[in-house]
Amino acid sequence: MNCQVSNKILLITYYWPPSGGSSVQRWLKMLKYFPEVKIEPYVITVDPSLASYPLIDKTLENEVHPDIKVYQTKTREFYNIYKKISGKKEIPYGGFVNEEKIDFRQIISRIIRSHFFIPDPRRGWNRFAFRKAVELIKKHDIRTIITASPPHSTQLIGLKLKKRFNLHWIADLQDPWTDIYYYNQLYHSFISASIDACYERKVLTEADYVITVSQSIKDIFSSKSKKINPRKICVVPNGYDEDDFKHIPEVKNNSFQITYTGTMNDDYYPIDSFLTASENITDKGFKIFMRFVGKLSSAIKQKIMNTKGIEYEFVDYVPHEESLKYLIKADALLLIIPNIHQNEGILTGKLFEYLGSGKKIIGIGPPQGDAANIINECNSGKMFDYNDVSGIEQYIEEIINRIQPDPDKEKIKNYSRKHQALEITRLLKF
């Protein structure tokens, strides 16, 4: 690729600052490196005053590179109807982690969602985004587009633009589509599920390249149709931005601190073995302080509060910059992979910021999964089976006693946002 000329790409993404969460950070962080190689990024996103974001983080607005041209559009949101039907004030988080008790109104709203808003409720944004995309493509002669999901409805914009302009189209799908772990909670009928699966196959077949975050998810997508060429599905995992950690000072704690960031509910996140192991360690005279930053179900909180010997703190969702400070404050970090079918390919965004922090990771999940492989590769921790109390206990003691060697900083750099941005530029075509 000739980096002496200015090339243009158009990213279409629903999630963009001031929305919070890992879906925003993936492209926000990578696009900042595109101007360095003479690539001119354009972004179409939703008007935040009309959007339905589960999380807001206004600090991320400060991280938008000045060379990125951002265009916001109108939308029509199903979630405004959802809140009226369900009686809920909050937008559902991924996996409905903030909906602990499902009542009749929520069931009805999910049935409406899965039958009239396929593939998802944010499809109401598509016609506005498509119209703006057509305008920008014609005005600026853009020949390469990237559609980012979640939500997967955004991929239908790419499908439509590909048909109209025959552009070079890269579809970035961070999550499985019809195989997402909470899919059966949406109450699809055979017809609505078939329509959804058809959309999925069309996107995977028609896109010039498909990017996803793990080999296991690539395998799922590759299996959807014999027409899908597995070689055009590329794995570009989430990552961390080295700049985020440059000015955060280390601290020395009086007790051993373990931090968890993100959401957690009792349906998919088995924490019992970890808590039992921690309780056993405190029985030996060690002091353990646990900090949980994010949205936890009341049942999970109760289990933590009932664990003998430990000290704990619950912190609600905080801006991204502040969450990184909590990582640096910790002595070790807790990672739990949801205990669901086909969880070997789950690579949460926080895993890579855990790596970037340089702290040891206590992982609970499939020991042969993609997350475990990356942790082992970087010598950044260890993954334990959900019921391995003795293994977790022994490993925490080894970290406390400084028996474990330091993480491999050079291997960790392979997961930096800058490195991944350069990987993606190899897929672009101008």
Image (cartoon, rainbow, N blue to C red):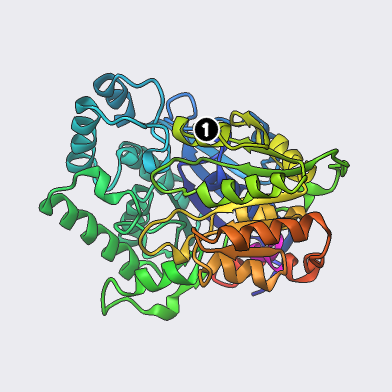
Q: Is residue 415 magenta?
A: yes
Closer to the camera, 429 or 417? 417
- Quarter assignment of residue 117: top left
Q: Is residue 195 left or right of residue 89?
A: left
Q: Is residue 88 magenta?
A: no
Residue sitting at x 18%, y 54% = 193
Q: Which residues are magenta?
A: 414-421
Q: Label 1, on which residue?
A: 301
Residue sitting at x 51%, y 51% = 11
Amino acid type, label 1:
Lys
Question: Residue 378's x, y, as percent?
Answer: 71, 69
Closer to the camera, 115 or 167? 115
Establish if 78 lies above or below 374. Answer: above
Question: Residue 376's x, y, as percent?
Answer: 66, 71
Magenta portion: prevailing SS class? helix
Residue sitting at x 48%, y 57% = 146
